[in-house]
Image (cartoon, rainbow, N blue to C red):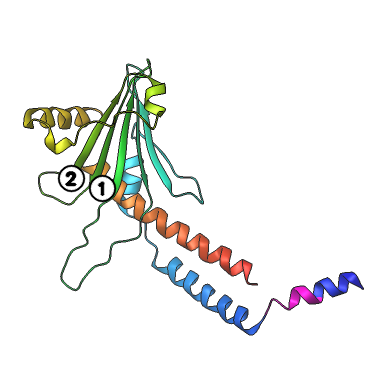
Amino acid sequence: TRVAARQVAGRQFASPAAIKLGKILAQEAQHEKEQYQQAPIIAEFTKGSPWKFEHKTGEVNLSLTQTLDDKTKVAVEWQLSSPTDMGDEDEPEESNEFTITVTKPSGATVVFYCSTERGESHRYVIGNVSCFATEEEANSQASYTGPEFEDLDDKLQESFDEYLAEIGLHEKLCDFIDATASDAEQKEYARWLDNMGKFVQ
């Protein structure tokens, strides 16, 4: 019958190659499960924090958001990243790009384009700072994106750093960004292994 024919056709997908692939996927998935450990900073940072963390399963984007006392909204956004390879003697140099968007109730917005870095005195670097008078201007791809941060006067750079510290950008937040970027990648890889295993069954 047609139903039987479809069932036979369906069983043809369980070829020797598919069976081998399924076994290897299962082994890799088990290995990932056994090796997975969440960095302590993730639970420590979010406990009692004013920041709301969000990462939707299956997506690469991660974010932290909070609303300040004057209704100003602050959003930190970054993406998952592969764990950094380590040499025999070198420590891993993690670096993740992120943005901090500060939006006033009026719609005026400032966006800081940053990246994390390992350093004794500073945990992040700022690439440039954009300032938009309106929400429409902020959403326009033709808007001026601001000067290179390193070209600004030193006192102005220091003042921007102090401003970011006031709204919550500090060493632990950068640690959280690096940790969750790697953690999310591990979780999405494990999910990918699971989905691939189901696909070849």
Q: Based on the displayed image, in which of its 4 quarters is residue 142 positioned?
A: top left
Label 1: how many residues lie within 10 Å, few (<14), some (14-19) or many (20+)? many
Label 2: how many residues lie within 10 Å, few (<14), some (14-19) or many (20+)? some
Q: Is residue 165 magenta?
A: no
Q: Work out which quarter of the rendered image holds the N terminus and state it.
A: bottom right
The residue labelled by disc 2 is 123
**Residues at marks 2 and 1, CA–CA distance in whole angstroms:** 8 Å
Q: Which mark is residue 175?
A: 1
Q: Amino acid at mark 2?
A: Arg
Sequence-wise first label, 2 or 1: 2
Q: Look at the picture and state if 73 lies above or below 172.
A: above
Seen at 14% across and 44% down, the residue is: 122
Q: Which mark is residue 84?
A: none
How far across and down, in percent of the image, does residue 35 sit?
39, 67
Nearer to me, 116 or 28: 116
Q: Amino acid at mark 1?
A: Asp
How far across and down, in percent of the image, does residue 194 sit?
55, 65
Residue 117 in view of the camera: yes
The reply to whether discs 2 and 1 touch (Cβ–Cβ < 8 Å) is yes
Q: Which residues are magenta?
A: 8-14
Nearer to me, 176 or 108: 108
Seen at 36% across and 29% down, the residue is: 66
Q: Residue furthest left?
A: 154
How far across and down, in percent of the image, does residue 19 sit?
62, 80
Seen at 21% across and 31% down, the residue is: 164
